[in-house]
Image (tube, rainbow, N blue to C red):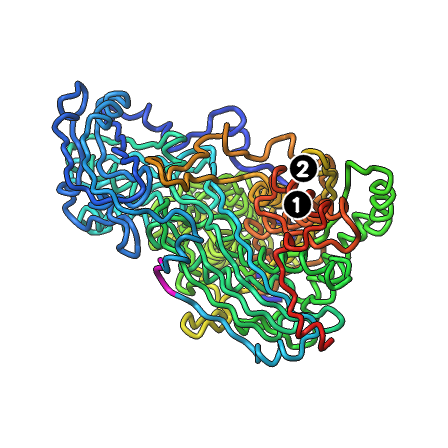
Amino acid sequence: MSQLSERPEKPVVGVSMPHESAFQHVTGAALYTDDLVHRTRDVLHAYPVQVMKAHGRITALRTEPALAVPGVVRVLTGADVPGVNDAGMKHDEPLFPEEVMFYGHAVAWVLGETLEAARIGAAAVEVELDEKPAIVTVREAIEAESFHGARPHMETGDVDAGFADSAHVFTGEFTFAGQEHFYLETHAALALIDESGQLFIQSSTQHPSETQEIVSHVLGIPAHEVTVQCLRMGGGFGGKEMQPHGFAAVAALGAKLTGRPVRFRLNRTQDLTMSGKRHGFHASWKIGFDAEGRIQALDATLTADGGWSLDLSEPVLARALCHIDNTYWIPNARVAGRIAKTNTVSNTAFRGFGGPQGMLVIEDILGRVAPLLGLDPVELRERNFYQPGQGQTTPYGQPVTQADRISAVWEQVKENASLADRKREIAAFNAAHPHTKRALALTGVKFGISFNLTAFNQGGALVLIYKDGSVLINHGGTEMGQGLHTKMMQVAATTLGIPLHKVRLAPTRTDKVPNTSATAASAGADLNGGAIKNACEQLRERLHQVAGTQLGGNASDVRIVEGVARVLGSDKELAWDDLVRTAYFQRVQLSAAGFYRTEGLHWDAKAFRGTPFKYFSNGAAATEVEVDGFTGAYRIRRVDIVHDVGDSLSPMIDIGQVEGGFVQGAGWLTLEDLRWDTGDGPHRGRLQTQAASTYKLPSFSEMPEEFNVALMENATEEGAVYGSKAVGEPPLMLAFSVREALRQAAAAFGPSGASVELASPATPEAVYWAIESVREGDEKRTGITPDTHALSNA
């Protein structure tokens, strides 16, 4: 076992414990970015001037009426930007635009003594627009050939030969929706400027270093004059990886120009209408199977709805292509990708980062064709799993080295869920209930862990030991409720060999750990844990030297366990606090900067080949649903999950992440229905689901009535920090089992062997129409065209 994976005697990692801020969360003592406003004097409030048209060039912008409003201090426009007027990394997102690109686009910002003054001032700003046609949907973009960014192409094997050898060939298409992050805390920032003109920005951001970089280039000042801190976030889910930067830049610009602190926070409606979402996709595909139902070839085109600017659309699309195989070996594949440019908000990262979209395509295909092949969907999926010992690679060329885990978690779920017995019970129930049907579906997950961009796979840390033996750790990861800080404290305590109460964690700041990557890609624990372990190992090595001298032994024989240093084979002891104090008086350095980079990665983005992922996380879920045939309303009766997190760093945290990810995935696939005005009226392009009253989020009533989550046992991941695996994103895709169960329940209302086309999200309305199509025996509703030539050859 590698040094990185090996656990010492009596480790603190692997122990179930609550979130480090759980008490503060439930008591209301936890502070978030906007809470700091009340501790800051003379704060100005920023409010956006939004234009309620989807597309048009600004012909006039009159700010004088706003300045006449009592309490308005200043109106920020593009003329005030001393540096680069751009809030993105692709230089296609002007902070103060000359062209309105989506409904609700902010073109200026008003600073007021009060939020109400700023709001009234923003309403007074006069904007004249030369309105232009707007593209609202991804289908409209495809028809208009409105695309931007890279067009990746992934190919393996001989696709044409694969289809020629197929006994069954089907073609179809699939359009599915995006998802709103709906984090509890909306976008927020607070910028302060000191006497020397340096900026300190509190920001609700997943990527403080990039927030620092954007603020730096907007203001035209070096990065060392900008410090960004993220205390904690009230949720992020990817929505705060890229999009906070421009908002922080607005606050920073206001502080720079007025000399006063500037606070910015979007209300919920503004956040919904101004910030990006999960990318919706359109997929067209052709797939071939042999006579036993094994995939022979796949030819697909994935079109992501990027919105008005690129943001992170290119890497999101790349990850979608990398995950279209999910758990299945596709020997011959050709997949093209493109990004639609639409006049909607710029879509961005969201938990899974394109992976769920790619995997949904193949899961939808298998769910639709299984009846046409005469196979149970569970059997069809099993026949196409990656197999151990076969040397199989993904379509982009990465070996699948843990294929055995795909089937291991699958079989464990089948056993835990009593799959065979319950299927018989469901069949009996359905036979006795003509207007209510149940179904049980099983789906799996194989999700790659690491950033697609190799350079992002690095992390840093700073660990300080004080003379009294207490330890303070800083790292580059941000806390958004996922428990990263809890795990990092456990890693530090384990590596140093001390009790957890000796360790405290400082807020994430760019002046403590520089040039960090976003807390994203499920890599937060891997990267920052590796960096903290590295820093602590440097300190431990120094302290072992001191302890060896004090205890009369070799440094290599020293072990520090539960805060006591001992030499192997000796009864002598030295308490941690005494060891640290002794080290100080011997002038031993008690601070260390740690660094970690993920080894073994290689990615050629142009050829779309390589090994972009350190490893794959695996999981499987079985979901049982009950559907009302009159309304399409459903309830989730039971969920059984087995998920592979390696050797868990913090089991209670990880189980919570699996539960939360599954529920969020179920929301995307079955409830959360983003609606835009696609008509030709004055509100074309307007987001119609602007609040929780119209945008349906999962609530207690949508929770599984029985929810069983187990972590895979004996699953050490070689080459990862203390043998653990990532947990943040992969569980979201376990929710495919909910959608597939709904498809099978709808099919149960019709004749045996019915293939069901099901919209995504599969809302009760969508389920109802699927049931109606099955009842009517509407063959066209499958959305699949069998290739009759291939069928006749069979």
Residue 695, image x and y in percent?
50, 34
What residue did someone put label 2 on? Answer: 632
| Label 1 Cα crowd, 10 Å radius (few <14 / some 14-19 / many 20+) | many
In this rendering, would 670 be left or right of 705?
A: left
Specify whether residue 641 is in view.
Answer: no
Q: Secondary structure at mark 1?
A: helix
The residues tagged by marks 2 and 1 sit, at their Cα atoms, a distance apart of 9 Å
> Where residue 793 appears, x then y in whole percent?
71, 77
Q: In front here: 398 or 515?
A: 398
Q: Disc 2 or 1, which lies upstream in sequence?
A: 2
- From the image, tell me which residue sits under label 1: 770
Asked whether residue 600 is drawn in magenta, I would say: no
Q: Which mark is residue 251?
A: none
Q: Nearer the viewer, residue 557 or 650?
A: 650
**Residue nearest the viewer, comparing 170 with 792:** 792
Question: Compared to 271, does 753 lie above or below?
Answer: below
Counting from the top left corner in percent of width and height, residue 74 is at 16, 30
Q: Quadrant of the N terminus?
A: bottom right
Q: Is residue 249 visible?
A: yes
- Residue 329: where, in percent of width, then height? 64, 69
- Category of crowding for the residue at label 2, using alpha-carbon neighbours closer than 10 angstroms: few (below 14), some (14–19), many (at least 20): many
Q: Residue at 66%, 39% (x, y): give it.
A: 768
* Tally of numbered discs: 2
* Image quarter of the C terminus: bottom right
Q: Secondary structure at mark 2?
A: loop
* Residue contact between numbered discs 2 and 1, judged by CB atoms under 8 Å: yes
Q: Amino acid at mark 2?
A: Gly
Q: Is residue 125 above or below residue 245?
A: above
Q: Amino acid at mark 1?
A: Ala
Tell me the chief SS of the magenta region.
loop
Stretch in magenta: 146-150
